[in-house]
Amino acid sequence: MFTTMESLLKGWEGESKITQNVMNALTEAAAKQEVAEGHRNLARVAWHIATSIPEMMSQTGLDFSGVDPEAPVPASVEEIKKVYAEASGRLLEEVKAKWNDDTLQQEDEMYGETWKKGLTTRILINHEIHHRGQMSVLMRQAGLVVPSIYGPAKEGWAEYNAPPPAV
């Protein structure tokens, strides 16, 4: 749980940058990659991440007008990337303008429970990390280069003039 705005802003800025890098690696050709028949495909997982920001954070009183969490998956991966960038940036704008350290202790009804705003933002980030992991697997299956997340992906080791770890 976040207890200071400084930690929240730093956490969101870092994680959303990583997620945007993953989103930016998506291609139209890979968008339909799914782990198994009848499961979410890559575009659907990416869209879920993008729309979870307004869906969850609007329940804390933040304004996400213009972003419909119930909208169907766009036909274009570029639209998904754009909506994620807008929602991520909007979250920063809203919390900077409306919240302070004390606000993080305020409670909201969330999914049949009561969560402090500092917990909600932590859960949002964890949720995004979870689905970003799913995306990286689907991206690899689709033949895309997975960007580095918390360390180099297989192809990222070249940046360090080092071979990838042995398989």
Image (tube, grey):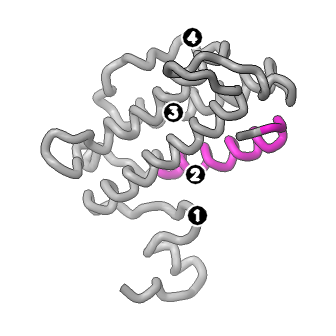
| Distance Cα–Cα, label 3 vs label 1 | 20 Å
Q: Is residue 25 above or below residue 76?
A: below
Return the residue at label 2.
18
Return the residue at label 4.
65
Q: Amino acid at mark 1?
A: Tyr
Asked if the residues shown at circle 3 and circle 1 are in contact, with their CB atoms under 8 angstroms apart, the answer is: no
Describe residue 141's horizontal placement relative to residue 167 as left or right.
left
Front residue of this view, candidates 5 and 97: 5
Q: Amino acid at mark 2?
A: Ile
Return the residue at label 1.
150
Asked if the residues shown at circle 2 and circle 1 are in contact, with their CB atoms under 8 angstroms apart, the answer is: yes
x, y percentage for residue 10? 76, 45
Residue segment shown in magenta = 3-22
Describe residue 150's horizontal placement relative to residue 5 as left or right.
left
Quadrant into which the N terminus falls: top right
Secondary structure, mark 2, is helix
Q: Is the residue marked by circle 4 packed among few (<14), some (14-19), or many (20+) residues within 10 Å? A: few
The answer to whether residue 21 is magenta is yes
Q: Is the residue marked by circle 3 packed among few (<14), some (14-19), or many (20+) residues within 10 Å? A: many
Return the residue at label 3.
84
Q: Residue at x 62, y 48 (%)?
A: 15
Q: Amino acid at mark 3?
A: Tyr
Q: Quadrant of residue 75?
A: top left
Is residue 33 visible in the rendered image? The answer is: yes
Secondary structure, mark 3, is helix
Q: Residue at x 26, y 57 (%)?
A: 142
Query: Quick one: label 2 or label 1, which is nearer the N terminus?
Result: 2
x, y percentage for residue 36? 17, 49
